[in-house]
Amino acid sequence: MQKKSSISTAMWFIPLLAILLACAFIFVYWMGRVLLRSTPSVKDIVLQNKSSQESTAPGTSVPIIPPTTPVEPDEENVPPQEVLDMGNIVVEEGKEESSPSEVCPATSVPVKMKKPTRAVTYTPYEKGLRQCKRQGVFPCAWEDKSAKIIKQYWLMGADGPITRGIYNMEGDLISETMATVNGTVTSYADQNTTWYFDGGMLVKIRTSPYDNCNLHDWFFIREDGKQDVCQCAYTVEDCCARSPYQERMKRSYCDLFPSDKDFCR
């Protein structure tokens, strides 16, 4: 009797367990589909962002809401680059905004230009000297009346010397200069004093302070710039004191007479 009751109980328990397992499997399957439907896909997120950006005023950015649960993106559905349109500025995701590359101008080959020729201007002294050398006839003379004085020049030969006399407008002699054809002064006479130069350096001075034009005082200058021998026409107590040369004076002609534009330029 007990054996029959256990058999009947087993016959009812097995179908009931199968039904319960089937219901549990159906419930789990139904819950899984509900969860999958409630989770948005990446494609839906992109479409949602684009639609929200189109409805948003230009110039305003729309934040992207990440999904609540991580979802593995489908490489076929996800575009390679997502473009965010913010007003008039288009920024590609993953790239920095770069300025347009500068275009180098075409390299032009420079043309060799000729140096401008400078117009050479000559003083009346230089013009006359050049003309006399071209003519080749000596002695050769020329004159300059451009200032309020009269300058007369004489070139005695192709190798010089040159003599220059400076006169006032009345014809009175002011000074007389002698120089080489290269313009190196050898002597300069001014009033009653004559300065003598060797290689452009002062070597002696002659003065004529007497009524007799044949009487002179001589003063000799050493190479170190000091006055050496003094010879006076009349015996005096200190002849060197009458010399126009001073111990600290420079010996070159252009240092002593820098205003001479013919021989000092």
Image: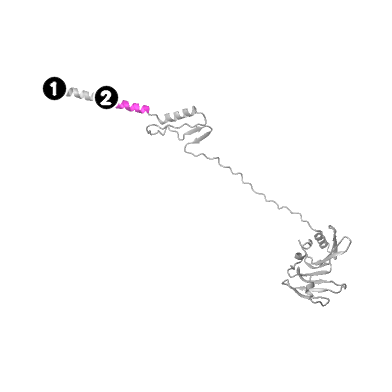
* Residue found farthest to the front: 237
Q: What span is colored magenta in the figure?
A: 22-38
* Numbered mark located on residue 113 in the image: none
Q: Left of 90 or right of it: where is 209?
A: right
Q: Which amino acid does label 2 sit on?
A: Cys
Q: In which quadrant is the N terminus drawn?
A: top left
Image quadrant holding the C terminus, namely bottom right
Q: Which residue is drawn at 32% across and 26% down?
A: 31
Whether 249 is drawn above or below 77: the answer is below
Task: Using the rendered view, name the quadrant where residue 18 is placed.
Answer: top left
Where's residue 147, x and y in %? Answer: 83, 58
Q: Residue at x 27, y 24 (%)?
A: 23
**Is 245 left, or right, of 56 in this rendering?**
right
The label on residue 23 is 2
Mark 1 / mark 2, whichever is N-terminal: 1
Q: How crowded is mark 2: few (under 14 residues within 10 Å), some or many (20 or more)?
A: few
Mark carried by residue 5: 1
Identify the colour scheme used. Answer: one colour
Q: Residue 70's x, y, as percent? A: 37, 33
**Gap between marks 1 and 2 measured at Cα:** 27 Å
- State the residue at coordinates (33%, 28%): 32
Please tell me how crowded label 1 is: few (under 14), some (14-19), or many (20+) other residues with Cα within 10 Å.
Answer: few
Residue at image position (44%, 28%) is 48
Residue 190 in picture, x, y percent from top left: 82, 67
Q: Please, what secondary structure does the residue beneath circle 2 have?
A: helix
Location of residue 230 (image quadrant): bottom right
